[in-house]
Image (tube, rainbow, N blue to C red):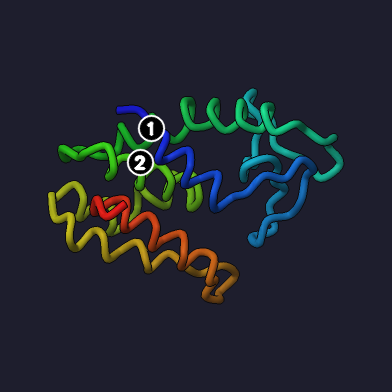
Amino acid sequence: MNVSQKCINLIKTFEGFRSHPYLCIAGVPTLGFGSTHYANGAPVGLSDGDISEPAAENILFATLQYDYVPAVNHCVTADINQNQFDALVDFAYNCGSQNLKNSTLLKLVNEGNFAAASLEFKKWCHCNGEVSQGLLNRREAERKLFMGEI
């Protein structure tokens, strides 16, 4: 599968656009629409120059195509629909592919227990040991997309 515009929109909504490098709430140098690496795989540095919004979109699309789409396609063994795929890609983009691979969320998805899987999203709302309202909001949006409510 590949991502739909719903996934792109979800990422853009929650990440927002920043033309200059910054430290995200987890302390990682980030740029554009939440990208921690450029399309060529090089990590973002805080001393890197500004980028345009179209350049940030190119980085986002490349990152999704080379990293997150293949990761979700590889680790999901159940038959899922487009909304479920998009929600899982957004989750992996935000939390990391390895966290998805090791999660109860994925285990339940692969068992076909989508209702229980949808409840797992909200467990991923902590940053630096504290609950983040922004992450709670994002996880709820992912859950709604996963369940076809949006």
- Specify the farthest residue to the front: 150
- In depth, the one of 146 and 28 nearer the eye is 146
Element at label 1: loop
What is the number of the mark on residue 19?
none
Image coordinates of residue 39 in percent, x first then y, are 62, 26
Q: Residue 32: name its quadrant.
A: top right
Q: Is residue 139 left or right of residue 112?
A: right
Closer to the N terminus: mark 2 or mark 1?
A: 1
Q: Are marks 2 and 1 in contact (CB under 8 Å)?
A: yes
| Image: 124 above or below 148 | below
Where does the N terminus fall, quadrant-wise?
top left
Which residue is found at the position 21% from the left and 50% from the top? 109
Q: Which residue is mark 2?
A: 86
Q: Which residue is mark 1?
A: 3
- Specify the farthest residue to the bottom: 130
Determine crowd level at label 1: few under 14, some 14-19, many 20+ residues with C-alpha closer than 10 A: many
Determine crowd level at label 2: few under 14, some 14-19, many 20+ residues with C-alpha closer than 10 A: many
**Label 2 – label 1 distance at C-alpha:** 6 Å
Image coordinates of residue 33 in percent, x first then y, are 62, 42
Which residue is found at the position 48% from the left and 26% from the top? 66
Image coordinates of residue 8 in percent, x first then y, are 47, 38
